[in-house]
Amino acid sequence: MEHPVQTDYLRWIVLLPLLGAAVNGLLGASLQRRFGKWVISLFACAPVLISFLLSLQAFLTLLALKPEERFLIDRLYSWLSLGTLNVDVAFWIDPLSAVMILVVTGVGGLIHIYSVGYMHEDKSYWRYFAFLNLFTFAMLLLVTADNLLLMFIGWEGVGLCSYALIGFWYQDHVNTRAGNKAFIVNRVGDFGFILGVFLIFWSLDQQGHGTLSFREIEKFAALLKNQEIWGMEVVTLTTLFLFIGATGKSAQIPLYVWLPDAMQGPTPVSALIHAATMVTAGVYMIARLHFLYSLAPLTLEVIAVIGIATALFAATIALTQNDIKRVLAYSTISQLGYMFLATGVAAYGAAIFHLMTHAFFKACLFLGSGSVIHALGGEQDMRKMGGLRGSMPYTFWTFAIAVLAIAGTPLTAGFFSKDEILWQVFSSPHGSGLLWVFGVVGAGLTAFYMFRQFFLVFFGECRADSHAQAHLHESPKVMTYPLVLLAIGSIAAGWIGLPAILGGSRFAEWLEPVLGKHHEAHASAALEEILMVLSVGVAALGFYLAYLLYYRRTLAPERFSSLAGGLPYRLFYNKYYIDEIYQFVFVRGTLLLARIGAWIDQYIIDFIVDGSAKTTAFISWFNGLFDNYVVDWLVNAVANVTFWSGNKFRRVQTGNINSYLYVILGAVVLAIIIRLRFSS
């Protein structure tokens, strides 16, 4: 840890997608016109695939080192040097970030390849791939950053790219509103994140160790434990601020509302956002700063409660949705809730494990839904699907494997990662039996709504219109091959994280140099087996209920939707009216404040300003009158009197010497008389 290995090729893992984005963004339009779309595909896909190969090389390099020495760094240059703050542009690869770059470039690379077929008819093909590459670059920057400030650049980058990609088809106002919503909601969370960054630096600077480097923060983290601000420990307030940022990026209550609307973007974008990039940023950030969160038990409690609440909240909404992508969107929110539940009980490795397995089966599900939408000419309503398994065998089987995985079917990737979370929730000192019960209920709901989707889309009679049925076809190989690879990952990825009763998790061992060894409560293997069987049983119950309702149809869905007067169904179907509440409170509230501000500006501020101007004008007018008719009259009167007097006195000057002598004589006589008068 003290002497990480300097490696010069790590920068290219991050910069190659940026290069692809630059080429397609600056030259893509002309290249597409002159050479066709294959050139755009080459400049888009090749950088990500090469980044994947370099990521694999970094992984193998780490694997060859001793566990305590598994740290690589690539310093480009010194970025900032202001007082005690020194920030480098440096890329840091350890076992944690190695998992993330393999997920981002591996799953992200398959999504790029899939996009070649899915977006082939789009006129803005070059623009799409420019943003897709830029998105990948920003996420790689986020997970490889050596310090918080560089991470924040990647953090903001994925937010900006999500805005551009969600609103990619900007001609439709619905899409632009969805992009705006994602951007604005994330800005709320990002404000909390940057406050956390400032607070970390300020607090450590007070102790003489101002830094934003992850390694330095970890070294001095204990110093934050003894500091207080606003009556709260600095480490608690800092981690809460950072968690606010995580709720925005990773779509947790209350900032989850942007993610379902993100479905307005192209389906591969949905897969990239939901599986490999943006929504995992919050989970990764907490795992990266685990040394701070472990010092803040109050924050961990908040995270666990928010996580399980989000998991159940989103799962209940997914039960009633009819849009094939919207079901998957709420499923993503729910699965992210499980990841935060794991971090809330300090099981950071379990959260990253589920993040990794979820990337495979959720990408497979989204790309599978895109294949269905592609075959049906853009139709997304599951009520207008059905019976597609015969026409789309590759999509059907890969979708089936991904559904089994997300439902936690034994021996699939989702089973191992979800079971690890539930076990840690039960056995961790930070966990509880109640949280475990809620987690198991969420697993049952997941199985139900995913198999409901599966049966509605692929079984029964086809309910699509005659035009769509006439053109039903399997997607091209460039779209189905990525589905096959993701389906394989949906099974195989979980076997590196076997539970303790099956030999222990190699994945947990891999992360130990970063996250440390997780000390779970002592419990018997028999208890772990019982809990595993119970969670699988609840998931099986969810499957069986979906089977009876939507495959066998021996139970009518209406019987359940009419329970309690239909109130629960209406709440779930209308998403608890949260969007309407937010629209009324925040959107209309903001507009109301804007109107009030405009009224105050127009009728009060403008009145004061205009009144001041008119008063000034009146005073000036009155002053002009006073000047013209008083001051000028007085001045002119004085001048006239002076002129008149001058004329009169001028007549004394006659030029006659006799007159002068008479005047002198008179003056002398008058003077003598006066003198004699006063002397007597």
Image: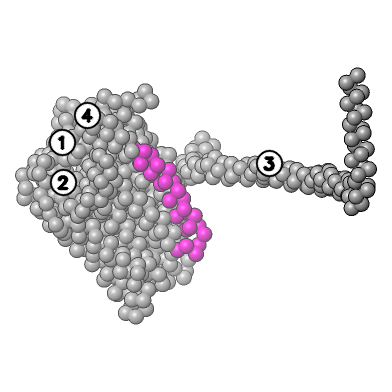
Instruction: Assess disc 4: are there few (<14), some (14-19) or many (≥20) residues with their C-alpha within 10 Å of its C-alpha.
Output: some
Label 2 vs label 4: CA separation? 23 Å
* Tag 3 secondary structure: helix
Q: Is residue 69 above or below residue 379?
A: above
Label 3 to label 2: alpha-carbon separation: 65 Å
- Which numbered disc flags the more N-terminal residue, 3 or 1? 1
Instruction: Find residue 387 and report its image quarter.
Output: bottom left
Identify residue type, mark 3.
Ile
In the image, which residues are magenta? 169-196
Which numbered mark, 3 or 1, is in the foreground of this view?
A: 3
Nearest to the observer: residue 349 or residue 620: 620
Q: Earlier in the sequence, mark 2 or mark 4?
A: 2
Q: Residue 311: say if magenta.
A: no
Q: Distance between the residues labelled 3 and 1?
A: 65 Å
Decide: marks 3, 4 in contact (CB < 8 A)?
Answer: no
> Disc 4 designates what residue?
222
Residue under label 3, please give it.
608
Marked residue nearer the N-terminal end (1 or 4): 4
Name the residue nearer the viewer: 232 or 511. Answer: 232
Q: How crowded is mark 2: few (under 14 residues within 10 Å), some or many (20 or more)?
A: many
Q: Looking at numbered disc 4 in the image, what kind of residue is underneath it?
A: Ala
The residue under the point 11% across, 41% down is 2
**To which residue does mark 2 refer?**
95
